[in-house]
């Protein structure tokens, strides 16, 4: 990296001190073996960055500082930093896969996609899968929106790639937990449920949309009492999921719907799957919110 910079400096007749510093940097570079990757490709990059480097050097000289050029920084990043990070991740991932194969049983996976920018015009989506039993990230897939019909398809494509990767590793998925992305739900239903995978929706995402709906309803005229109920209703949603380890859909539905009765001070329900509230009697308890009247919200 240093040679062309040094040469240019000499031609430009920069002050001696700057030249000495420059040659010191070059010597260090050689010791670190940087010149080994100084192939034709890098030289062409250097050429393209010539002007930027020159500006940078001018600044350095003006302040009496030495610093690496942007070109050197990005080259270093591309040839050393990123490959090292990728290698470290691959090693970690192989360790996790080994661990899971020793544990046995089907995988319990939670997956979601993160876009590089919020909204619908993201360029990249990165799909991550966590194995819930060991609470570790099992796979990450990066999808560029130009690879799929539109950026909203990045999520499904990321999931497909992850599943292909796991299939290549001979791993079985017994449960997959995702948000309510429609494309994902359809694909999982058609391609994975038939292979024995159970699909669940993540309670956090459902809780968020219920919360939004409650906030909107509480803004309606004479419905502000509902606002005080919001935390209790969300809590009840989490409880519905947490208190039903079997995942029995009838029981969960009955528990969730019992909330409509509970907020009206009715604690006995018509459903045999959940005939009465699980809380102790509420008489005499200090209350911070009113029971709701039917038809008011
Ligand atoms: Zn109740």
Image (cartoon, rainbow, N blue to C red):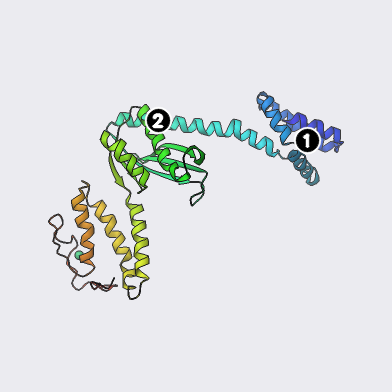
Q: How many marks?
A: 2
On the image, which quarter does residue 45 sit in? top right
Residue annotated with mark 2 = 95
Residue 24: percent from left, percent from top:
75, 32
Q: Position of residue 100 (x, y in %)?
A: 33, 32
In primary-sequence order, the first of circles 1 and 2 is 1
Q: Secondary structure at mark 1?
A: helix
- Dividing the picture into quadrants, the one containing residue 224 is bottom left
Give x and y (percent) for residue 250: 18, 51
Q: Which part of the image, by quadrant, shows the C terminus? A: bottom left
Q: Look at the picture and state if 297 lies above or below 164.
A: below
Label 1 to label 2: alpha-carbon separation: 45 Å
**Would residue 106 be visible to someone looking at this image?**
yes
Say which mark, if any, is on residue 21: 1
Residue occupying image coordinates x 81% and y 30%: 7
Give the quarter the ligand 1 occupies: bottom left
């Amino acid at each position: 990296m240093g040679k062309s910079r040094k040469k240019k400096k000499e031609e430009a007749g920069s002050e001696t001190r700057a030249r000495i510093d420059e040659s010191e940097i070059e010597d260090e570079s050689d010791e670190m073996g940087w010149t080994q990757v100084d192939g034709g490709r890098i030289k062409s990059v250097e050429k393209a960055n010539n002007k930027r480097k020159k500006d940078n050097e001018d600044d350095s000289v003006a302040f009496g500082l030495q610093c690496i050029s942007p070109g050197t920084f990005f080259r270093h990043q591309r040839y050393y930093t990123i490959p090292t990070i990728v290698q470290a991740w691959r090693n970690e991932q192989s360790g996790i896969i080994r661990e899971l194969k020793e544990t046995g049983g089907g995988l319990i996976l939670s997956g979601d996609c993160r876009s590089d920018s919020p909204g619908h015009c993201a360029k990249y989506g990165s799909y991550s899968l966590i194995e819930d039993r060991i609470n570790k990230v099992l796979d990450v897939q990066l999808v560029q929106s130009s690879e799929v019909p539109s950026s909203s398809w990045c999520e499904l494509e990321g999931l497909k790639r992850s599943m292909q990767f796991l299939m290549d590793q001979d791993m079985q998925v017994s449960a997959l937990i995702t948000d309510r992305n429609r494309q994902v739900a359809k694909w999982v239903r058609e391609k994975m449920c038939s292979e024995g995978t159970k699909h669940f929706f993540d309670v956090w995402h459902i809780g968020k949309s219920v919360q939004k709906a409650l906030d909107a309803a509480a803004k309606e005229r004479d419905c502000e009492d509902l606002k005080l109920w919001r935390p209790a209703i969300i809590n009840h949603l989490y409880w519905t999921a947490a208190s039903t380890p079997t995942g029995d859909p009838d029981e969960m539905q009955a528990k969730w719907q019992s909330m409509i009765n509970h907020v009206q001070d009715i604690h006995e329900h018509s459903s045999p799957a959940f005939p009465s509230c699980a809380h102790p009697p509420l008489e005499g308890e200090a209350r911070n919110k009113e029971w709701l009247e039917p038809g008011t919200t």
